[in-house]
Image: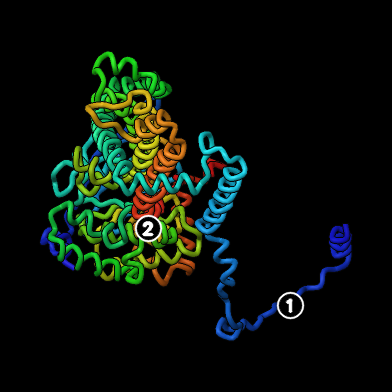
Amino acid sequence: MNAMEAGQQADAAPRAKRPDSIRKVVPASEIGAIEVPLPWTQRIWNSSLFRRAVILIVLAVIWEGYGRWLDNPLSFPTLSETLTSLWTDIANGQIPDRLQVTLRILLMGYGLGIVLAAVLTTLAVSTRIATDLLSTLTAMFNPMPAIALLPLALLWFGLGVPSLIFVIVHSVLWAVALNTHAGFLAVSTTLRMAGQTFGLRGLRLVTGILIPAAFPAILSGLKIGWAFAWRTLVAAELVFGVSAGQGGLGWYIFEKRNLLETSGVFAGLITVMIVGLFVEGVIFQTIERLTVRRWGMHGG
Amino acid sequence: MGQPALKDPARGEALLQVDGVTLQYRTPERQVIATYRVDFDIRPGERLILLGPSGCGKSTLLKAIAGFIKPVEGAIRLNGAPVIRPGPDRMMVFQEFDQLLPWKTVRHNVTYPLRCNGVPADEANRRAEQVIASVNLSAFIDSYPHTLSGGMKQRVAIARAMAMRPQILLMDEPFAALDALTRRKMQEELVALWERVGFTLIFVTHSIEEAVLVGSRVVLLSPHPGQVCAEINVEEFGGPNSSGEDFQHVCRRIHDLLFPPAAGEMQ
Protein backbone atom coordinates (compact mmCIF):
# COMPACT_ATOMS: atom_id res chain seq x y z
CA MET A 1 0.00 0.00 0.00
CA ASN A 2 2.76 2.37 0.99
CA ALA A 3 4.56 1.84 -2.23
CA MET A 4 1.37 2.49 -4.17
CA GLU A 5 0.66 5.73 -2.35
CA ALA A 6 4.20 6.83 -2.83
CA GLY A 7 3.85 6.03 -6.53
CA GLN A 8 0.68 8.10 -6.79
CA GLN A 9 2.29 10.98 -5.01
CA ALA A 10 5.21 10.85 -7.37
CA ASP A 11 2.80 10.91 -10.27
CA ALA A 12 0.98 13.89 -8.88
CA ALA A 13 4.08 15.96 -8.16
CA PRO A 14 6.13 17.19 -11.12
CA ARG A 15 8.78 14.49 -11.49
CA ALA A 16 12.21 15.64 -10.54
CA LYS A 17 14.77 14.30 -12.99
CA ARG A 18 17.16 11.95 -11.26
CA PRO A 19 20.78 12.61 -12.16
CA ASP A 20 23.01 9.85 -13.56
CA SER A 21 25.06 8.11 -10.97
CA ILE A 22 28.46 6.56 -11.66
CA ARG A 23 29.63 4.34 -8.81
CA LYS A 24 32.96 2.95 -7.80
CA VAL A 25 33.32 -0.83 -8.06
CA VAL A 26 35.62 -2.41 -5.48
CA PRO A 27 38.08 -4.78 -7.14
CA ALA A 28 37.43 -8.43 -6.21
CA SER A 29 40.87 -8.67 -4.60
CA GLU A 30 39.94 -6.06 -1.97
CA ILE A 31 36.72 -7.74 -0.87
CA GLY A 32 38.60 -10.55 0.87
CA ALA A 33 37.76 -14.21 0.76
CA ILE A 34 34.94 -14.67 -1.75
CA GLU A 35 34.89 -18.45 -1.40
CA VAL A 36 35.37 -19.98 2.05
CA PRO A 37 35.46 -23.75 2.58
CA LEU A 38 32.77 -25.11 4.92
CA PRO A 39 33.85 -26.50 8.32
CA TRP A 40 34.79 -30.20 8.18
CA THR A 41 31.82 -31.33 10.30
CA GLN A 42 29.42 -29.90 7.75
CA ARG A 43 31.36 -31.29 4.82
CA ILE A 44 31.34 -34.79 6.33
CA TRP A 45 27.60 -34.59 7.03
CA ASN A 46 27.06 -33.47 3.43
CA SER A 47 28.52 -36.76 2.22
CA SER A 48 25.67 -39.19 1.63
CA LEU A 49 28.12 -42.06 2.09
CA PHE A 50 28.75 -40.94 5.67
CA ARG A 51 25.05 -40.50 6.44
CA ARG A 52 24.30 -43.96 5.09
CA ALA A 53 27.09 -45.47 7.12
CA VAL A 54 25.56 -43.92 10.23
CA ILE A 55 22.18 -45.46 9.37
CA LEU A 56 23.83 -48.85 8.82
CA ILE A 57 25.55 -48.72 12.18
CA VAL A 58 22.29 -47.80 13.94
CA LEU A 59 20.49 -50.69 12.21
CA ALA A 60 23.29 -53.10 13.16
CA VAL A 61 23.09 -52.05 16.82
CA ILE A 62 19.30 -52.53 16.83
CA TRP A 63 19.67 -55.98 15.22
CA GLU A 64 22.30 -57.13 17.69
CA GLY A 65 20.34 -55.77 20.64
CA TYR A 66 17.03 -57.33 19.55
CA GLY A 67 18.71 -60.69 18.80
CA ARG A 68 20.27 -60.83 22.25
CA TRP A 69 17.06 -59.81 23.96
CA LEU A 70 15.09 -62.46 22.02
CA ASP A 71 17.78 -65.08 22.63
CA ASN A 72 16.38 -67.50 20.04
CA PRO A 73 19.08 -68.26 17.44
CA LEU A 74 16.72 -70.65 15.61
CA SER A 75 14.35 -67.91 14.48
CA PHE A 76 16.42 -64.75 14.82
CA PRO A 77 20.19 -65.03 15.25
CA THR A 78 22.15 -62.00 16.38
CA LEU A 79 24.24 -59.98 13.97
CA SER A 80 27.45 -61.35 15.46
CA GLU A 81 26.29 -64.96 14.97
CA THR A 82 25.31 -64.15 11.39
CA LEU A 83 28.65 -62.50 10.67
CA THR A 84 30.47 -65.42 12.21
CA SER A 85 28.78 -67.97 9.97
CA LEU A 86 29.20 -65.62 7.00
CA TRP A 87 32.91 -65.47 7.72
CA THR A 88 33.24 -69.21 8.31
CA ASP A 89 31.47 -70.07 5.05
CA ILE A 90 33.48 -67.55 3.11
CA ALA A 91 36.69 -68.86 4.63
CA ASN A 92 35.85 -72.52 3.96
CA GLY A 93 34.98 -71.66 0.38
CA GLN A 94 31.30 -72.61 0.52
CA ILE A 95 29.87 -69.17 -0.23
CA PRO A 96 32.46 -68.26 -2.90
CA ASP A 97 31.76 -71.56 -4.69
CA ARG A 98 28.01 -71.05 -4.63
CA LEU A 99 28.40 -67.43 -5.68
CA GLN A 100 30.57 -68.44 -8.58
CA VAL A 101 27.94 -70.91 -9.81
CA THR A 102 25.24 -68.25 -9.58
CA LEU A 103 27.28 -65.54 -11.25
CA ARG A 104 28.36 -67.77 -14.11
CA ILE A 105 24.76 -68.65 -14.96
CA LEU A 106 23.78 -65.05 -14.50
CA LEU A 107 26.42 -63.71 -16.89
CA MET A 108 25.51 -66.29 -19.53
CA GLY A 109 21.84 -65.39 -19.32
CA TYR A 110 22.54 -61.67 -19.13
CA GLY A 111 24.84 -61.79 -22.13
CA LEU A 112 22.41 -63.81 -24.20
CA GLY A 113 19.58 -61.48 -23.23
CA ILE A 114 21.58 -58.43 -24.34
CA VAL A 115 22.49 -60.02 -27.66
CA LEU A 116 18.85 -60.87 -28.35
CA ALA A 117 17.80 -57.37 -27.28
CA ALA A 118 20.35 -55.87 -29.68
CA VAL A 119 19.02 -57.99 -32.55
CA LEU A 120 15.42 -57.10 -31.76
CA THR A 121 16.19 -53.38 -31.44
CA THR A 122 18.20 -53.32 -34.65
CA LEU A 123 15.24 -54.85 -36.47
CA ALA A 124 12.87 -52.45 -34.74
CA VAL A 125 14.73 -49.32 -35.83
CA SER A 126 15.00 -50.51 -39.42
CA THR A 127 11.44 -51.54 -40.26
CA ARG A 128 8.07 -50.40 -39.07
CA ILE A 129 6.58 -53.87 -38.73
CA ALA A 130 9.49 -54.91 -36.48
CA THR A 131 8.84 -51.82 -34.36
CA ASP A 132 5.27 -52.99 -33.88
CA LEU A 133 6.51 -56.52 -33.19
CA LEU A 134 8.87 -55.23 -30.50
CA SER A 135 6.26 -53.06 -28.82
CA THR A 136 3.66 -55.84 -28.89
CA LEU A 137 6.04 -58.44 -27.50
CA THR A 138 7.29 -56.04 -24.84
CA ALA A 139 3.78 -55.10 -23.82
CA MET A 140 2.90 -58.80 -23.51
CA PHE A 141 5.98 -60.12 -21.75
CA ASN A 142 7.32 -57.20 -19.72
CA PRO A 143 4.64 -57.42 -17.01
CA MET A 144 5.11 -61.19 -16.70
CA PRO A 145 7.31 -62.16 -13.72
CA ALA A 146 10.08 -64.36 -15.05
CA ILE A 147 9.67 -66.77 -12.16
CA ALA A 148 6.17 -67.58 -13.43
CA LEU A 149 7.78 -69.11 -16.50
CA LEU A 150 9.84 -71.48 -14.41
CA PRO A 151 7.37 -74.43 -14.56
CA LEU A 152 7.28 -74.08 -18.32
CA ALA A 153 11.06 -73.87 -18.48
CA LEU A 154 11.32 -77.06 -16.42
CA LEU A 155 8.94 -78.75 -18.82
CA TRP A 156 10.93 -77.66 -21.86
CA PHE A 157 14.51 -77.76 -20.67
CA GLY A 158 14.35 -79.98 -17.60
CA LEU A 159 16.22 -79.39 -14.36
CA GLY A 160 19.44 -77.58 -15.03
CA VAL A 161 21.24 -74.56 -16.31
CA PRO A 162 19.26 -74.11 -19.56
CA SER A 163 16.04 -73.55 -17.61
CA LEU A 164 17.72 -70.93 -15.43
CA ILE A 165 19.16 -69.19 -18.47
CA PHE A 166 15.75 -69.22 -20.10
CA VAL A 167 14.13 -67.31 -17.24
CA ILE A 168 17.06 -64.87 -16.98
CA VAL A 169 16.92 -64.13 -20.70
CA HIS A 170 13.23 -63.46 -20.32
CA SER A 171 13.80 -61.05 -17.47
CA VAL A 172 16.63 -59.15 -19.23
CA LEU A 173 15.50 -59.09 -22.84
CA TRP A 174 12.36 -56.95 -22.64
CA ALA A 175 13.71 -54.32 -20.30
CA VAL A 176 16.88 -53.80 -22.33
CA ALA A 177 15.15 -53.86 -25.72
CA LEU A 178 12.45 -51.45 -24.61
CA ASN A 179 14.93 -48.93 -23.18
CA THR A 180 17.36 -49.14 -26.06
CA HIS A 181 14.62 -48.64 -28.61
CA ALA A 182 13.22 -45.66 -26.70
CA GLY A 183 16.76 -44.27 -26.47
CA PHE A 184 17.28 -44.50 -30.23
CA LEU A 185 13.97 -42.78 -30.90
CA ALA A 186 14.91 -39.97 -28.51
CA VAL A 187 18.17 -39.07 -30.27
CA SER A 188 17.71 -35.49 -31.45
CA THR A 189 17.26 -34.80 -35.14
CA THR A 190 20.02 -32.21 -34.97
CA LEU A 191 22.53 -34.79 -33.76
CA ARG A 192 21.52 -37.24 -36.49
CA MET A 193 21.82 -34.51 -39.12
CA ALA A 194 25.18 -33.43 -37.73
CA GLY A 195 26.38 -37.01 -38.06
CA GLN A 196 25.15 -37.12 -41.64
CA THR A 197 27.02 -33.94 -42.55
CA PHE A 198 30.19 -35.71 -41.37
CA GLY A 199 29.45 -38.15 -44.17
CA LEU A 200 28.27 -40.94 -41.84
CA ARG A 201 25.60 -43.33 -43.08
CA GLY A 202 24.11 -46.69 -42.17
CA LEU A 203 26.05 -48.74 -39.65
CA ARG A 204 28.68 -46.04 -39.08
CA LEU A 205 25.96 -43.56 -38.17
CA VAL A 206 24.52 -46.11 -35.73
CA THR A 207 27.82 -46.90 -34.00
CA GLY A 208 29.26 -43.40 -34.22
CA ILE A 209 26.24 -41.31 -33.27
CA LEU A 210 23.10 -43.25 -32.32
CA ILE A 211 24.53 -45.71 -29.81
CA PRO A 212 26.55 -43.16 -27.82
CA ALA A 213 23.68 -40.67 -27.98
CA ALA A 214 21.26 -43.31 -26.70
CA PHE A 215 23.74 -44.60 -24.16
CA PRO A 216 22.00 -43.16 -21.08
CA ALA A 217 18.83 -45.04 -22.02
CA ILE A 218 20.78 -48.19 -22.89
CA LEU A 219 22.57 -48.06 -19.55
CA SER A 220 19.35 -47.67 -17.62
CA GLY A 221 17.95 -50.65 -19.54
CA LEU A 222 21.02 -52.67 -18.58
CA LYS A 223 20.56 -51.68 -14.93
CA ILE A 224 16.90 -52.67 -14.88
CA GLY A 225 17.77 -55.89 -16.72
CA TRP A 226 20.49 -56.69 -14.18
CA ALA A 227 18.13 -56.07 -11.25
CA PHE A 228 15.46 -58.33 -12.75
CA ALA A 229 17.98 -61.04 -13.59
CA TRP A 230 19.60 -61.09 -10.15
CA ARG A 231 16.31 -61.33 -8.27
CA THR A 232 14.94 -63.91 -10.69
CA LEU A 233 17.99 -66.11 -10.52
CA VAL A 234 18.21 -66.26 -6.72
CA ALA A 235 14.49 -66.99 -6.54
CA ALA A 236 14.73 -69.66 -9.24
CA GLU A 237 17.59 -71.37 -7.44
CA LEU A 238 15.52 -71.52 -4.28
CA VAL A 239 12.78 -73.37 -6.14
CA PHE A 240 15.10 -75.46 -8.21
CA GLY A 241 17.76 -76.54 -5.91
CA VAL A 242 20.75 -78.35 -7.20
CA SER A 243 21.47 -78.54 -10.86
CA ALA A 244 24.29 -80.60 -12.29
CA GLY A 245 25.45 -81.51 -8.83
CA GLN A 246 26.20 -77.92 -7.83
CA GLY A 247 23.78 -75.41 -6.37
CA GLY A 248 24.03 -71.66 -6.40
CA LEU A 249 23.46 -69.04 -3.74
CA GLY A 250 19.70 -69.60 -3.62
CA TRP A 251 20.29 -73.27 -3.00
CA TYR A 252 22.75 -72.41 -0.21
CA ILE A 253 20.01 -70.44 1.57
CA PHE A 254 17.50 -73.25 1.11
CA GLU A 255 20.00 -75.82 2.37
CA LYS A 256 20.78 -73.83 5.50
CA ARG A 257 17.10 -73.60 6.31
CA ASN A 258 16.77 -77.38 5.99
CA LEU A 259 19.68 -77.77 8.39
CA LEU A 260 18.00 -75.24 10.72
CA GLU A 261 21.16 -73.12 10.59
CA THR A 262 19.29 -69.84 10.65
CA SER A 263 22.46 -67.77 10.94
CA GLY A 264 23.55 -69.40 7.67
CA VAL A 265 20.26 -68.36 6.06
CA PHE A 266 20.96 -64.80 7.13
CA ALA A 267 24.53 -65.06 5.88
CA GLY A 268 23.22 -66.15 2.47
CA LEU A 269 20.75 -63.26 2.39
CA ILE A 270 23.51 -60.82 3.28
CA THR A 271 25.64 -62.19 0.45
CA VAL A 272 22.77 -61.70 -1.98
CA MET A 273 22.40 -58.14 -0.73
CA ILE A 274 26.11 -57.36 -0.89
CA VAL A 275 26.49 -58.68 -4.43
CA GLY A 276 23.41 -56.72 -5.53
CA LEU A 277 24.72 -53.57 -3.87
CA PHE A 278 28.18 -54.06 -5.33
CA VAL A 279 26.93 -54.40 -8.88
CA GLU A 280 24.43 -51.57 -8.63
CA GLY A 281 26.38 -49.26 -6.34
CA VAL A 282 29.92 -49.85 -7.56
CA ILE A 283 29.97 -51.32 -11.07
CA PHE A 284 27.03 -49.45 -12.58
CA GLN A 285 27.80 -46.28 -10.62
CA THR A 286 31.35 -46.31 -11.93
CA ILE A 287 30.19 -46.82 -15.50
CA GLU A 288 27.71 -43.99 -15.01
CA ARG A 289 30.32 -41.67 -13.54
CA LEU A 290 32.78 -42.36 -16.35
CA THR A 291 30.17 -41.93 -19.08
CA VAL A 292 26.81 -40.22 -18.76
CA ARG A 293 27.70 -38.05 -15.74
CA ARG A 294 30.95 -36.94 -17.25
CA TRP A 295 29.14 -36.11 -20.50
CA GLY A 296 26.36 -34.24 -18.72
CA MET A 297 23.80 -36.63 -20.22
CA HIS A 298 22.18 -37.90 -17.03
CA GLY A 299 18.63 -37.07 -16.09
CA GLY A 300 17.71 -36.35 -19.67
CA MET B 1 44.61 -21.57 -44.88
CA GLY B 2 44.30 -23.57 -48.02
CA GLN B 3 40.85 -22.70 -49.20
CA PRO B 4 40.74 -24.34 -52.61
CA ALA B 5 37.75 -22.18 -53.48
CA LEU B 6 39.81 -19.00 -53.27
CA LYS B 7 42.66 -20.30 -55.37
CA ASP B 8 40.25 -21.51 -57.99
CA PRO B 9 41.23 -19.89 -61.31
CA ALA B 10 37.54 -19.88 -62.18
CA ARG B 11 36.90 -17.42 -59.38
CA GLY B 12 33.88 -15.42 -60.31
CA GLU B 13 32.15 -18.56 -61.50
CA ALA B 14 29.35 -19.92 -59.36
CA LEU B 15 30.46 -22.42 -56.73
CA LEU B 16 26.93 -23.49 -55.94
CA GLN B 17 23.91 -23.03 -58.16
CA VAL B 18 20.35 -23.21 -56.97
CA ASP B 19 18.32 -23.54 -60.10
CA GLY B 20 14.52 -23.31 -60.09
CA VAL B 21 14.24 -25.23 -56.84
CA THR B 22 10.79 -26.07 -55.52
CA LEU B 23 10.72 -27.78 -52.15
CA GLN B 24 7.86 -29.55 -50.46
CA TYR B 25 7.39 -31.03 -47.07
CA ARG B 26 4.64 -33.19 -45.66
CA THR B 27 2.72 -32.93 -42.46
CA PRO B 28 0.41 -35.79 -41.50
CA GLU B 29 -2.50 -33.86 -43.01
CA ARG B 30 -1.14 -32.01 -46.00
CA GLN B 31 1.65 -31.43 -48.45
CA VAL B 32 3.12 -27.95 -48.22
CA ILE B 33 5.19 -26.04 -50.77
CA ALA B 34 8.06 -24.47 -48.81
CA THR B 35 9.86 -22.67 -51.63
CA TYR B 36 8.79 -22.08 -55.20
CA ARG B 37 11.25 -21.98 -58.10
CA VAL B 38 14.10 -20.39 -56.21
CA ASP B 39 17.15 -19.31 -58.23
CA PHE B 40 20.40 -17.96 -56.94
CA ASP B 41 24.05 -18.82 -57.00
CA ILE B 42 26.98 -18.27 -54.74
CA ARG B 43 30.54 -17.47 -55.72
CA PRO B 44 33.67 -18.49 -53.87
CA GLY B 45 34.42 -16.30 -50.86
CA GLU B 46 30.95 -14.81 -50.65
CA ARG B 47 28.93 -14.58 -47.46
CA LEU B 48 25.45 -15.18 -48.81
CA ILE B 49 22.52 -14.57 -46.51
CA LEU B 50 19.13 -16.20 -46.97
CA LEU B 51 16.80 -13.70 -45.36
CA GLY B 52 13.07 -13.93 -44.97
CA PRO B 53 10.24 -13.95 -42.49
CA SER B 54 9.32 -17.08 -40.54
CA GLY B 55 7.84 -19.75 -42.78
CA CYS B 56 9.46 -18.58 -46.00
CA GLY B 57 11.25 -21.91 -46.34
CA LYS B 58 14.76 -20.54 -45.87
CA SER B 59 15.78 -23.28 -43.43
CA THR B 60 14.23 -25.90 -45.69
CA LEU B 61 16.23 -24.43 -48.56
CA LEU B 62 19.43 -24.68 -46.54
CA LYS B 63 18.65 -28.29 -45.66
CA ALA B 64 18.17 -28.99 -49.35
CA ILE B 65 21.58 -27.46 -50.08
CA ALA B 66 23.02 -29.63 -47.31
CA GLY B 67 21.46 -32.63 -49.06
CA PHE B 68 18.82 -33.59 -46.50
CA ILE B 69 15.85 -32.79 -48.75
CA LYS B 70 15.43 -33.49 -52.45
CA PRO B 71 13.89 -30.75 -54.60
CA VAL B 72 10.67 -31.76 -56.32
CA GLU B 73 11.61 -29.44 -59.17
CA GLY B 74 14.88 -27.85 -60.24
CA ALA B 75 18.40 -28.72 -59.17
CA ILE B 76 21.13 -27.77 -56.73
CA ARG B 77 24.64 -28.11 -58.10
CA LEU B 78 27.96 -27.84 -56.34
CA ASN B 79 30.79 -27.27 -58.82
CA GLY B 80 28.42 -28.47 -61.49
CA ALA B 81 27.65 -31.79 -59.78
CA PRO B 82 24.15 -32.27 -58.37
CA VAL B 83 23.83 -32.45 -54.58
CA ILE B 84 22.41 -35.85 -53.63
CA ARG B 85 23.17 -36.40 -49.99
CA PRO B 86 24.70 -34.68 -46.97
CA GLY B 87 28.44 -34.65 -46.92
CA PRO B 88 31.50 -33.04 -45.35
CA ASP B 89 32.01 -30.68 -48.31
CA ARG B 90 28.96 -28.77 -47.00
CA MET B 91 29.44 -28.75 -43.26
CA MET B 92 26.50 -27.28 -41.41
CA VAL B 93 26.19 -25.31 -38.18
CA PHE B 94 22.74 -25.67 -36.64
CA GLN B 95 20.84 -23.36 -34.36
CA GLU B 96 20.47 -25.99 -31.63
CA PHE B 97 23.16 -26.28 -28.98
CA ASP B 98 22.82 -30.08 -28.95
CA GLN B 99 24.59 -30.40 -32.29
CA LEU B 100 27.84 -31.16 -30.44
CA LEU B 101 28.49 -34.75 -29.43
CA PRO B 102 28.14 -34.61 -25.64
CA TRP B 103 30.32 -37.68 -25.13
CA LYS B 104 33.32 -36.04 -26.75
CA THR B 105 35.48 -33.16 -25.55
CA VAL B 106 35.76 -29.97 -27.59
CA ARG B 107 38.95 -31.31 -29.17
CA HIS B 108 37.37 -34.62 -30.14
CA ASN B 109 34.21 -32.97 -31.37
CA VAL B 110 36.41 -31.17 -33.87
CA THR B 111 38.66 -34.11 -34.76
CA TYR B 112 35.87 -36.71 -35.02
CA PRO B 113 34.46 -35.65 -38.41
CA LEU B 114 38.03 -35.31 -39.70
CA ARG B 115 38.86 -38.83 -38.54
CA CYS B 116 35.61 -40.10 -40.10
CA ASN B 117 36.87 -38.78 -43.41
CA GLY B 118 40.27 -40.36 -43.24
CA VAL B 119 42.39 -37.45 -41.98
CA PRO B 120 45.30 -38.94 -39.98
CA ALA B 121 45.14 -38.49 -36.22
CA ASP B 122 48.02 -36.03 -35.79
CA GLU B 123 46.93 -33.91 -38.72
CA ALA B 124 43.35 -33.86 -37.34
CA ASN B 125 44.67 -32.84 -33.94
CA ARG B 126 46.85 -30.09 -35.40
CA ARG B 127 43.92 -28.68 -37.37
CA ALA B 128 41.64 -28.92 -34.33
CA GLU B 129 44.05 -26.94 -32.16
CA GLN B 130 44.37 -24.34 -34.87
CA VAL B 131 40.63 -23.76 -35.42
CA ILE B 132 39.83 -23.93 -31.72
CA ALA B 133 42.41 -21.23 -31.16
CA SER B 134 40.84 -19.18 -33.94
CA VAL B 135 37.51 -19.18 -32.11
CA ASN B 136 39.27 -18.32 -28.82
CA LEU B 137 38.49 -21.57 -27.03
CA SER B 138 41.99 -22.98 -26.50
CA ALA B 139 41.46 -22.88 -22.73
CA PHE B 140 38.47 -25.19 -23.07
CA ILE B 141 39.89 -27.63 -25.59
CA ASP B 142 39.60 -30.61 -23.25
CA SER B 143 36.25 -29.66 -21.71
CA TYR B 144 33.02 -31.50 -22.36
CA PRO B 145 30.28 -29.53 -24.17
CA HIS B 146 27.87 -29.52 -21.22
CA THR B 147 30.28 -27.35 -19.27
CA LEU B 148 30.26 -24.62 -21.95
CA SER B 149 27.89 -21.70 -22.41
CA GLY B 150 25.61 -21.47 -25.43
CA GLY B 151 27.89 -19.04 -27.25
CA MET B 152 30.90 -21.25 -26.65
CA LYS B 153 29.05 -24.29 -27.95
CA GLN B 154 28.20 -22.43 -31.15
CA ARG B 155 31.86 -21.44 -31.51
CA VAL B 156 32.86 -25.09 -31.19
CA ALA B 157 30.30 -25.99 -33.85
CA ILE B 158 31.76 -23.32 -36.14
CA ALA B 159 35.29 -24.55 -35.42
CA ARG B 160 34.25 -28.13 -36.13
CA ALA B 161 32.75 -27.13 -39.46
CA MET B 162 35.76 -24.99 -40.43
CA ALA B 163 38.31 -27.67 -39.54
CA MET B 164 36.72 -29.81 -42.23
CA ARG B 165 37.57 -27.09 -44.79
CA PRO B 166 34.25 -27.52 -46.56
CA GLN B 167 33.59 -26.02 -49.98
CA ILE B 168 30.72 -24.13 -48.39
CA LEU B 169 29.91 -23.51 -44.76
CA LEU B 170 26.17 -23.66 -44.05
CA MET B 171 24.73 -21.93 -41.02
CA ASP B 172 21.11 -22.17 -39.96
CA GLU B 173 20.38 -19.25 -37.63
CA PRO B 174 23.39 -20.22 -35.52
CA PHE B 175 23.09 -17.25 -33.16
CA ALA B 176 19.29 -17.12 -32.80
CA ALA B 177 19.22 -18.92 -29.44
CA LEU B 178 21.88 -16.65 -27.89
CA ASP B 179 21.35 -13.55 -25.77
CA ALA B 180 21.58 -10.24 -27.60
CA LEU B 181 25.04 -9.24 -26.33
CA THR B 182 26.60 -12.60 -27.13
CA ARG B 183 24.88 -12.67 -30.50
CA ARG B 184 26.37 -9.32 -31.50
CA LYS B 185 29.83 -10.44 -30.43
CA MET B 186 29.51 -13.70 -32.35
CA GLN B 187 28.44 -11.85 -35.50
CA GLU B 188 31.54 -9.66 -35.32
CA GLU B 189 33.76 -12.66 -34.61
CA LEU B 190 32.34 -14.53 -37.57
CA VAL B 191 33.10 -11.68 -39.96
CA ALA B 192 36.59 -11.28 -38.45
CA LEU B 193 37.17 -15.00 -38.93
CA TRP B 194 36.04 -14.72 -42.52
CA GLU B 195 38.49 -11.86 -43.08
CA ARG B 196 41.33 -14.02 -41.80
CA VAL B 197 40.41 -17.35 -43.38
CA GLY B 198 38.16 -16.50 -46.28
CA PHE B 199 35.60 -19.31 -46.44
CA THR B 200 32.40 -19.37 -48.45
CA LEU B 201 29.30 -19.05 -46.32
CA ILE B 202 25.55 -19.47 -46.66
CA PHE B 203 23.84 -18.09 -43.60
CA VAL B 204 20.13 -18.24 -42.83
CA THR B 205 18.52 -15.60 -40.64
CA HIS B 206 15.27 -13.77 -40.12
CA SER B 207 16.99 -10.67 -38.73
CA ILE B 208 17.63 -7.85 -41.22
CA GLU B 209 20.36 -6.35 -39.00
CA GLU B 210 22.13 -9.69 -38.74
CA ALA B 211 21.91 -10.14 -42.50
CA VAL B 212 23.55 -6.78 -43.17
CA LEU B 213 26.17 -7.25 -40.43
CA VAL B 214 27.24 -10.73 -41.42
CA GLY B 215 26.61 -10.90 -45.15
CA SER B 216 28.22 -9.69 -48.31
CA ARG B 217 25.12 -10.42 -50.37
CA VAL B 218 21.57 -10.97 -49.21
CA VAL B 219 18.96 -13.11 -50.95
CA LEU B 220 15.50 -11.95 -49.88
CA LEU B 221 12.76 -14.54 -49.78
CA SER B 222 9.09 -13.66 -49.84
CA PRO B 223 6.74 -15.18 -47.28
CA HIS B 224 5.15 -18.55 -47.74
CA PRO B 225 5.90 -20.12 -50.15
CA GLY B 226 9.38 -18.66 -50.43
CA GLN B 227 10.37 -17.03 -53.71
CA VAL B 228 13.41 -14.86 -54.30
CA CYS B 229 12.21 -11.27 -54.32
CA ALA B 230 15.58 -9.53 -54.43
CA GLU B 231 19.34 -9.96 -54.15
CA ILE B 232 21.17 -7.09 -52.53
CA ASN B 233 24.88 -6.41 -52.03
CA VAL B 234 25.59 -5.31 -48.48
CA GLU B 235 29.36 -5.75 -48.45
CA GLU B 236 30.06 -2.13 -47.55
CA PHE B 237 27.60 -1.83 -44.68
CA GLY B 238 28.86 -4.43 -42.22
CA GLY B 239 31.79 -4.23 -39.84
CA PRO B 240 32.74 -0.83 -38.43
CA ASN B 241 30.07 0.97 -40.49
CA SER B 242 27.33 -0.94 -38.80
CA SER B 243 25.88 1.93 -36.80
CA GLY B 244 25.93 4.64 -39.45
CA GLU B 245 23.12 6.15 -41.44
CA ASP B 246 23.91 4.01 -44.48
CA PHE B 247 23.38 0.92 -42.37
CA GLN B 248 19.99 2.16 -41.21
CA HIS B 249 19.15 3.05 -44.79
CA VAL B 250 19.96 -0.35 -46.25
CA CYS B 251 18.05 -2.09 -43.45
CA ARG B 252 15.07 0.12 -44.21
CA ARG B 253 15.38 -0.69 -47.89
CA ILE B 254 15.48 -4.43 -47.24
CA HIS B 255 12.55 -4.13 -44.89
CA ASP B 256 10.49 -2.36 -47.55
CA LEU B 257 11.41 -5.00 -50.12
CA LEU B 258 10.35 -7.79 -47.80
CA PHE B 259 7.21 -6.02 -46.61
CA PRO B 260 6.14 -3.68 -49.41
CA PRO B 261 4.57 -0.56 -47.83
CA ALA B 262 1.66 -0.92 -50.25
CA ALA B 263 0.79 -4.23 -48.66
CA GLY B 264 -0.27 -2.34 -45.57
CA GLU B 265 0.38 -3.60 -42.04
CA MET B 266 1.85 -6.89 -43.14
CA GLN B 267 4.55 -6.84 -40.55
- Considering depth in this image, is A276 or B149 the residue closer to the camera? A276
Q: Which mark is residue A140?
A: none
Residue at mark 2:
B145
Q: Name which residue lies at 58% across and 80% down.
A: A33
C-alpha distance separating marks 2 and 1: 45 Å
What amino acid is at disc 2? Pro
- Residue farthest along the bottom direction in this orientation: A30
Kindly report which numbered mark, 2 or 1, lies closer to the viewer in this rendering: 2
Check contact, mark 2 vs mark 1: CB within 8 A: no
Label 2 element class = helix
Residue B29 in view in this figure:
no
Same-subunit check for callouts 2 and 1: no
Q: Is residue A4 shown left or right of residue A152?
A: right
Chain bearing tag 1 is A
Q: Residue at x 41, y 61 (%)?
A: B148
Q: Position of residue A73 (x, y in %)?
A: 52, 38
Comparing B127 with A64, the one in front is: A64
In the image, B238 versus A67, the foreground residue is: A67
- The circle drawn on residue A19 is 1
Which of the 4 image quarters holds residue A229?
top left
Is disc 1 placed on a helix, strand or loop? loop
Q: Chain of mark 2?
A: B
> Residue B54: image x %, image y %?
45, 43
Local crowd size for mark 2, using a 10 Å CA cut-off: few (<14), some (14–19), many (≥20)? many
Q: Please provide percent x and percent y for residue B35.
A: 34, 37
Q: Residue A122, image x and y in percent?
A: 25, 31
- Residue at 17%, 60% in the rendered image: B5
Quadrant of the image containing the N terminus of chain A: bottom right
- Tell me, yes or no, if residue A77 can be seen here: yes
Q: Residue furthest left?
A: B9
Q: Residues within 10 Å of mark 1 (few under 14, many from 20)?
A: few
Quadrant assignment, res A218: top left
